[in-house]
Amino acid sequence: MLASHFYDGLVEAGCDEAGRGCLAGSVYAGAVIFPPDYENAELNDSKQLTEKRRYALRETIERDAVAWAVGVVTPEEIDRINILNASFLAMHRALDRLAVRPEAIIVDGNRFKPYRDLPYTTIVKGDGKYLSIAAASILAKTYRDDYMAGLAAEYPEYGWLSNKGYPTAKHREAIRQYGITPYHRLSYNLTGELSLDFKD
């Protein structure tokens, strides 16, 4: 089972984002505070779970968490401040929305911008190590998937229902054939040969 906390004796929020490597759509982030010594053997990195399991666990997270929230940064904002800063901003917005103020933060990955004056720790592959980060990854992923499903109904040619805005062959071909939409990130190399290996 994943660890319940990193900091001893502090109200700790776990953070993670979804959609950083996409060509289209907003980037989403989750922030979750669980009760001290919370246990849940089913929680794991959202990428290791089936879609059905992620949505079932979202209900569990929202029921069990002391506080949870989701933050969003739009494609226009991503183009203005770049995707790395947008990921940090999405996490800050999620933290802003928490009903309970955290005393410390743990973040998936190896980079983060300080939030207020709170201590924080970045943890590589933290979504597979700590319950609150795993929960944040599930919230970010499922709420972003809901958002992309709505966009897919508006622009079915791009395959967003399945690729969620990531640079799949179908998505790249649709950009070449139909051009870009208002939801594409214009600062990305959208019209050329997309050779970059984007990863979330």
Image (cartoon, rainbow, N blue to C red):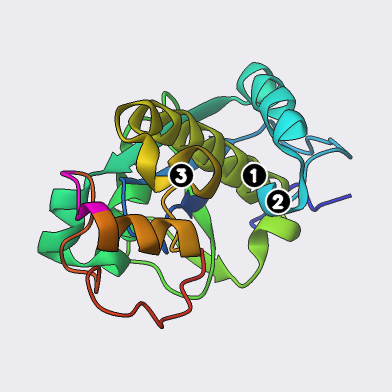
Note whether residue 10 is visible.
no
Which callout, 3 or 1, points to the residue nearer the camera?
Answer: 3
The span shown in magenta is 178-182
Queried whether the magenta region covers residue 128, the answer comes back as: no
Amino acid under label 1?
Ser
Callout 2 crowding tier (Cα within 10 Å): few <14, some 14–19, many ≥20 = many
Percent position of residue 90, x then y: 32, 48
Between residues 60 and 154, which one lies in front from this camera angle?
Answer: 154
Quadrant housing residue 50: top right
Mark 2 highlights which residue?
Answer: 5
Note whether residue 39 is visible.
yes
Between residues 146 and 42, which one lies in front from this camera angle?
Answer: 146
Give the Cα separation between the discs numbered 3 and 2. 38 Å
Mark 1 vs 2, N-terminal side:
2
Tag of residue 159: 3
Q: Is residue 104 above or below residue 34?
A: below
Which is the main secondary structure of the residues drawn in magenta? loop
Mark 3 vs 1, N-terminal side:
1
Give the Cα separation between the discs numbered 3 and 1. 31 Å
Percent position of residue 163, x then y: 51, 49
Amino acid under label 2?
His
Quadrant housing residue 43: top right
- Identify the residue at image location x=38%, y=46%: 158
Residue that protrudes farthest toward the front in the picture: 177
Report helix, strand or loop for mark 3.
loop
Percent position of residue 123, x then y: 60, 69
